[in-house]
Image: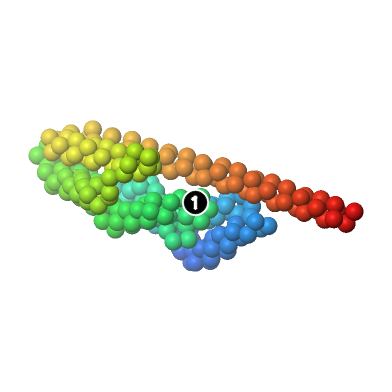
Amino acid sequence: ALRFSPGAVLALVMAVLLVVRRRQMRRTCAALAERIVRPRSDAIGHTVHALVLTLVIALPLPLLFFAMAEFFSTGSSGLSLAIGDGLRWIVAPCYLLVLLRELSGEGGLARLHFGWPEVLCNGFYRESRNFLRIGLPLALATIIVLEIESGDNAAALGRLLYLAMLALLIGRLVWLLRRGRLPSREQRPLVTRLRLRVLALISSIAAFIAVAQGHVYSVNLLLTSVLETLALVLALSLLYGLLARWLQVARRRLRMASLLAYRSGDGAGGGG
């Protein structure tokens, strides 16, 4: 019989508590963002505090998926075990998407503390929200069906769902490429972003062809590696943002100290 394990109960309790406290944590993030605007109150500790709060704010939905995965994994039927495996697989991608949405949203850490370009933040926010609404449920359904059909050599529904998910991704990338303007060579960030989109499109088309030919396991390994790489890139970007903020705060304090020394020296000279 299905039952809640101690880990599932703990995850559910934590998710509920974080949802209750989420509004207050966002108000704290907004207050921290106001402090870094003023040179006298700016400090790297405010950015670290805001980063920790953002990491925590993104936890409730992944914790809920984890709790449900533990719940269904206690069953003995193939369906419950497949649902448990599917929910467990999407915990990490869900956290990455929610975290990216929180970082790049209006008043997010990436905009106010790290100074990421607005067009980049808008794109991250829009795409992470779309993947949470459409891509993640479709991925969950695909994994569940693939797990159920894992022992059937003639299974086709899971592969069709996989192809549908990849087709949506390809269509989205094509839309992004057609929507964006061709940058000049001097606009290096835009050129890099265009190249990444083209690379992602080519990789998605190759994955579509591979799944259509039955190489589902190989594509799963490739997709797992891509998700791990994206998680590493996001972690390094946050670390780089913290280092850049620390240097910014240090330079601001040095300029303020030199300005105060100049004023005090000018005042002493005028008094003499």
Residue 241 place in picture, x, y as percent: 52, 45
Give above or below for 192 relative to 79: above
Name the residue located 24 percent from the left edge and 47 percent from the top edge. 177
Residue most extreme to the right: 272
Q: Is any atom of residue 229 visible in this view?
A: yes
Residue most extreme to the left: 154
Quarter of the image with the N terminus in it: bottom left
Name the residue located 26 percent from the left edge and 56 percent from the top edge. 134
Instruction: Report the side of 228 relative to 257 (left or right).
Output: left
Residue 224 place in picture, x, y as percent: 32, 38
Q: How many marks?
A: 1
Quarter of the image with the C terminus in it: bottom right
Q: Is any atom of residue 8 visible in this view?
A: no
Front one among 218 and 9: 218
Name the residue located 64 percent from the left edge and 49 percent from the top edge. 252
Residue 49 found in image quarter: bottom right
Residue 97 place in picture, x, y as percent: 37, 51
Q: Mark 1 highlights which residue?
A: 115
As helix, strand or loop, the secondary structure at mark 1 comes to: loop
State how the image is colored. rainbow
Front one among 90 and 122: 122
Instruction: Report the side of 10 relative to 66 (left or right).
Output: right
Give above or below for 213 relative to 268: above
